[in-house]
Amino acid sequence: MCSGRRLAAIVLSFMPLAEATAASVEWRRYAIPATGLSVDVPVSIFEEDRGATEGRLERHLFTKDYRANLTIKSFPNPDNDSPAVFLEKMRPPADIQYRRVTPKFFAVSGVLNGHTWYNRCNRAKGFMNCVLINYPAAEERQWDAIVTRISLSLAK
């Protein structure tokens, strides 16, 4: 009986994302004009928008139930560090499960406290333009296509 309730809870927890994925997902282009950052965002999934943070080059979005979040952010990079150098300065965790670093961008991800985190930053003049995504690790397959589109749409 207990395992049946647990299974029902797991299935119900996947419903909003599964429904959004099966239905037509509404995407919107978000931009930070001052830095050239622009990215596609699934607004039918990240429905809670805290808007741009005043005085900062970032925006925070959440799923309605706050289980997942997306931050769009331009980090100052006054020394125009390469993605590899910038990543090292950020002191990433040692247990990164995925790492790709090129002269134009880096992408890293891992799992922490039951959540998958994924960060991609593209090099731009004076900035690193980034998307930072966190979602339940148990839902990784459901998030794959969404994370891929967000990541590949990141401009500059």
Image: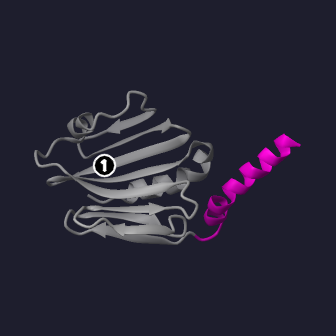
Within the magenta stretch, is there residue 20? yes
Q: Quadrant of the C terminus?
A: bottom left
Q: Residue furthest top?
A: 94
Q: Residue furthest right?
A: 1
**Element under label 1?**
strand
Q: Where residue 96 sits in the image (x, y, percent)?
A: 42, 32
Q: What's the image's color scheme?
A: one colour
Q: Is residue 127 above or below residue 55?
A: above
Tell me where residue 106 appears, x and y as whole percent: 32, 42
Residues drawn in magenta: 1-24
Residue at the spot x=21%, y=36% of the render? Answer: 85
Q: Is residue 108 left or right of residue 63?
A: left
Is residue 128 shown left or right of residue 80? right
Quadrant containing the N terminus is top right
Residue at the image position 19 percent from the left and 67 percent from the top: 34
Residue labelled with disc 1: 121
Q: Quadrant of residue 87?
A: top left
Number of numbered discs: 1
Question: x, y (%) of residue 95?
Answer: 43, 28
- Amino acid on which the number 1 mark rests in the picture: Cys
Identify the image quadrant of residue 61. Answer: bottom left
